[in-house]
Image (spheres, rainbow, N blue to C red):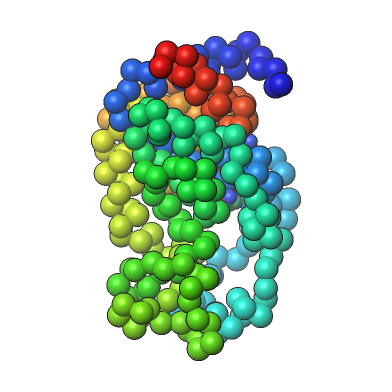
Amino acid sequence: MTTIDTSVQHAIEDAAKLLRRSNHAVALSGAGLSAESGIPTYRGTGGIWTRFGEPTIDGWELFASDPKAWWEEAIAHGASEFSVAIERSEPNAGHIAMAQLEEMGRLAHTITQNIDNLHRRAGSRRLTEIHGNRYLVRCMNCGARERLETVSLDRLPPLCCECGGILKNDIVMFGEPIPDDALRESYKQAGASDLFLSVGTSAVVYPAADFPLMAKRRGSPLIEVNPEETALSEFADVIVRAPAGVALPAIVELLAQEL
Ligand code: NAD
């Protein structure tokens, strides 16, 4: 059993109180939520970029200039250490707690920056994957998404079965615009929220980092769940300085006591 220190326990109780009072709580989750599933973060202690530096930011440019060459390179390159970690991962206690909050009617929507599919696998249904999902492909013309495993890669680039447009993986690349549907839903949810939870994100990637700030500007309290200080910490009303896999189940437990 994990021991929770007193200041963290107080913050957990404050977070549960805010969730109890709210009618439309919205969460933004990031790589830190999946860290306890064995998927490395980019930033923060132990993050891939913290250890090895930031990669070049030309993914979208490369895809847009030659989709066929991009697909050939992706297939030839095979699985990276990062994608192997995702393939092996399972939803952790934090993902499960977020799905439970949704089920209990305490969490209206989750906007995730994660591409690992773990929220869906944990049972979250009111979900916007603003940076895409690595198990899907998306049509550059009509925006339709299909499961990557159902797409034939015999002819490259693969084409959309709806409109014949070029398919790319659904992950939003550096420099690529966020798909309209995901962006619209995220702004709609942030605009409707009366409480905002930021979980496991360094909150430096825009536009995602704008949603908690937008909610805050509208008067919604902000809860941060992150073991480290972030760009959002100074705006947070409640800060739970603990791993998501510890903090979120403890919040669920408090809320479940009154059901
Ligand atoms: P980030 O890597 O910039 O920051 C991770 C944050 O998580 C840090 O603030 C760190 O302190 C915190 N953290 C670490 N362990 C935690 C834990 N157990 N519980 C709670 N918080 C913890 O992540 P970001 O803000 O999501 O932005 C990075 C971008 O990288 C996103 O666009 C995302 O798409 C992508 N990414 C996704 C994955 C994934 O799908 N699992 C993994 C790495 C990066």
| Residue 36 visible in this rendered orientation of the protein | yes
Looking at the image, residue 151 sits to the left or right of residue 211; the answer is: right
The residue closer to the viewer here, 89 or 223, is: 89
Looking at the image, residue 103 sits to the left or right of residue 134; the answer is: left
Residue 25 location (% of width, % of height) = 35, 30
The residue closer to the viewer here, 215 or 1, is: 1
Quarter of the rendering occupied by the N terminus: top right
| Residue 217 visible in this rendered orientation of the protein | no
- Residue sitting farthest toward the bottom: 155
* 150 in relation to 3, above or below: below
Residue 161 found in image quarter: bottom left
Image mark count:
0
Residue drawn at 52 percent across, 32 percent down: 97
* 9 in relation to 147, above or below: above
Residue drawn at 46 percent across, 37 percent down: 99
Residue 205 location (% of width, % of height) = 48, 49
Residue drawn at 66 percent across, 40 percent down: 36
Residue 259 found in image quarter: top left
* 30 in relation to 106, above or below: below
Residue 142 location (% of width, % of height) = 30, 72
Residue drawn at 62 percent across, 27 percent down: 246
The residue closer to the viewer here, 180 or 64, is: 180
Give the quadrant of ligand 1. Answer: top right
The residue closer to the viewer here, 23 or 65, is: 23
Residue 155 location (% of width, % of height) = 50, 89
Looking at the image, residue 8 sits to the left or right of residue 189; the answer is: right
